[in-house]
Image (spheres, rainbow, N blue to C red):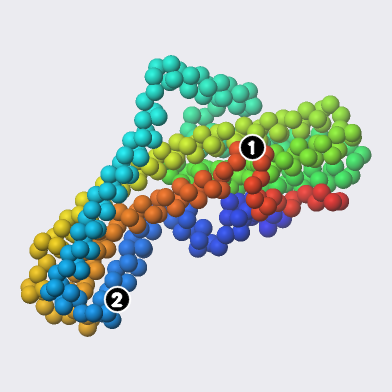
Amino acid sequence: MDDLLSRDTLRGRTGENPVAHWFLLDANRWVLAGLLSAVAFATFVVLGAISLPMREMMDSGTPIDTAFQALIAAVLTGVTLVVSINQLVLSQELGRLGDQQRWMNEAMAYRHDVEELFGSVGPPDPAQFLQAIVQTSSDRAEALREAVADTDDETLRQRTDRLVENVCRNSDEIESQLETSQFGEFGVLRSGLNYNYSWKIYAVRRLRDEHGDSLDDDQLAAFDELIDSLTLFGPALEHFKSLYFQWELVHLTRSMLYSGLPGVVAATATVLYLDPELVRGTILGIDTMVWLVGASATITLVPFFLLTTYVLRIATISKRTGSLGPFILRRAERTEAIDWDE
């Protein structure tokens, strides 16, 4: 059963290598960019040590100057492009009064639907809001188990027990993750993605359909209530995912601006002021010029490493959450908590 539970998480459903999962999703983007920078710097130093002498290329001037001039142009273009995309995305927030009112009405209508599920006013915090939906789904799953406990259909009882166990254990795991998560960080969205609600909706609906002839009105109502609670989780997750993407674009823009200025300064200084005649000696047996040029090139490339890390996470999330509702795009998304061939 532990293996079944692990398959409900995002990594468990995809069967992805832990290192790849950390690289694509969990790692701090600045830390990951730092690792990429370290790899790039080491590569530059090694290539400089084993290839043509750096000092001879600096004396000729052309290769180094051309490379850094291209880097300067690329950094300026890349930063400008990211800022423009960020402005385009954020411009959607600057709608007319009528649009703002319509969005507000839609948000309030959804909250009213969810609060009917809760029986009280829903929490304003996104993490607590998702936590409340998950807890309600767990409670309704237990209510479903109690509703079918006295049925004569043994297969229905066994399948319901396994389904409820899966829902409750996955819910407990998600609730514990959400308790320490704060919106704006990846933790809230990661916890939501670990809740395999699409498969749960399908499993509950199929279970109700296959055993519909042996269910009374109260049992059918228990099934419907569980489906309703699971269904309301999807729009909330998608809404918070959209907000998270906006936050990520803002963070990306700030990161590109913070790292782009030092990159342009380093590249420009290398072209204008680095004189081979003034840099002598070796460090660890490697010409000091190799270290300086490698460091300057690495600093200039940091904005691109940051862009890579942020885009990788956004693209990965988009790919793995491409369907809203009971559609399951990958076979790995399905669990074996219920043996439908019994």
* Residue 21 coordinates in the image, percent (x, y): 51, 58
Q: Give coordinates of residue 128: x percent, y percent.
A: 52, 35
Residue type for callout 2? Leu
Q: Hey, which residue is sitting farthest left in the picture?
A: 278
Residue 209: percent from the left, percent from the top?
82, 36
Residue 190 in view (yes/no): no
Task: Report which residue position mark 2 lands on.
Answer: 47
Graded by Cα atoms within 10 Å as few (under 14), some (14 to 19) or many (20 or more), the crowding at tag 2 reads some
- Quarter of the figure with the N terminus: bottom right
Is residue 236 depicted above or below 154 in this figure?
Answer: above
Q: Nearer the viewer, residue 94 or 126?
A: 94
The residue lying toward the viewer, choosing from 57 and 2, is: 57
Residue placed under numbered mark 1 in the picture: 325
Q: Which residue shows up at 76% across the image and 33% down it? A: 223
Residue 20 is situated, as x and y percent measured from the top left of the image, at 50, 61
Query: Earlier along the polypeptide chain: callout 2 or callout 1?
Result: 2
> Is residue 297 visible in this depiction of the protein?
yes
Mark 2 or mark 1, whichever is nearer to me: 2
